[in-house]
Image: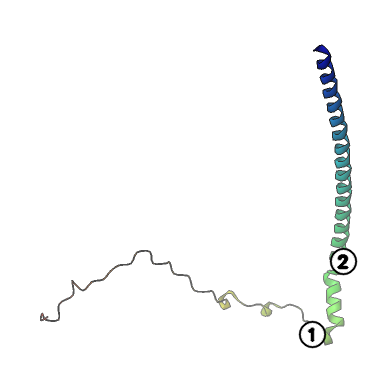
C-alpha cells in the first residue's frame, strides 16, 4: 500500500510540475504581448503628438488669414464681424410640451338648468 501511495504522490508532483511549467510559459507569452501593446501605445501617443503639432501649425490664425487673402476670389471668405452673428431674440424655440392629461373631469349637465324650466 505504501508503494502505491509513493507512486501516486510522485505522479501528482510530476503533474503539478508540468502544470507549473505550462503556466510559466503562458505567463511569459502574456507578458510579451503586454510589452508589445505598451510599445504600440507609446508609438500611437508619439504619432498623436506629431499630428496635434501639425494641426496646430496648420491652424495658425496668421496662416489661415493669408490663405483666405490668397484665395479670396475663389472662396470669398471675409473676416468675422460682430454683425455676422445673430442676437438671442432671433432664436425661435419650440413650444413647450403640454403635460399629458392623467385625470379627466367629467362635466355633466345635472347642474345646468333644464330646457323646460324658465330662467
Is residue 86 left or right of 14 when viewed as pictured?
Answer: left
Instruction: Tell me the SS state at disc 1.
Output: loop
Looking at this view, is 93 or 84 the one in front? 93
Compared to residue 74, the image places residue 91 above or below, namely above
Q: Quadrant of residue 102?
A: bottom left
Q: Quadrant of residue 92?
A: bottom right
* Residue tagged 2: 57
* Residue tagged 1: 76
Q: Which residue is rendered at x = 86% and y = 48% of the image? A: 37
Is residue 90 left or right of 51 when viewed as pictured?
Answer: left
Give coordinates of residue 32: x percent, y percent: 89, 42
Give coordinates of residue 86: x percent, y percent: 63, 78
Between the C-alphas of marks 1 and 2, the distance is 23 Å
Q: Earlier in the sequence, mark 1 or mark 2?
A: 2
Q: Which residue is rendered at x = 30% and y = 67% of the image? A: 105
Density class for disc 1 (Cα within 10 Å; few <14, some 14-19, many ≥20) is few
Give coordinates of residue 60: x percent, y percent: 84, 69
Q: Quadrant of residue 27?
A: top right
Instruction: Tell me the SS state at disc 2.
Output: helix
Marker disc for residue 68: none
Density class for disc 2 (Cα within 10 Å; few <14, some 14-19, many ≥20) is few
Looking at this view, is 74 or 48 the one in front? 48
Dividing the image into 4 quarters, which one contains the C terminus? Answer: bottom left
Q: Which residue is rendered at x = 88% and y = 31% of the image? A: 21
Residue pushed farthest top? Answer: 2
Q: Which residue is rendered at x = 21% and y = 74% of the image? A: 109
Looking at this view, is 39 or 25 the one in front? 25
Compared to residue 103, the image places residue 39 above or below, namely above
Image coloring type:
rainbow
Amino acid at each position: 500500500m505504501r508503494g502505491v501511495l509513493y507512486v501516486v504522490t510522485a505522479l501528482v508532483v510530476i503533474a503539478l510540475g508540468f502544470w507549473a511549467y505550462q503556466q510559466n510559459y503562458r505567463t511569459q507569452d502574456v507578458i510579451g504581448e503586454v510589452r508589445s501593446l505598451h510599445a504600440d501605445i507609446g508609438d500611437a501617443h508619439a504619432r498623436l503628438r506629431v499630428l496635434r503639432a501639425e494641426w496646430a501649425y496648420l491652424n495658425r490664425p496668421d496662416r489661415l488669414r493669408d490663405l483666405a487673402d490668397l484665395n479670396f476670389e475663389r472662396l470669398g471668405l471675409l473676416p468675422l464681424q460682430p454683425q455676422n452673428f445673430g442676437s438671442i431674440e432671433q432664436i425661435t424655440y419650440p413650444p413647450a410640451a403640454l403635460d399629458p392629461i392623467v385625470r379627466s373631469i367629467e362635466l355633466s349637465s345635472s347642474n345646468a338648468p333644464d330646457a323646460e324650466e324658465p330662467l
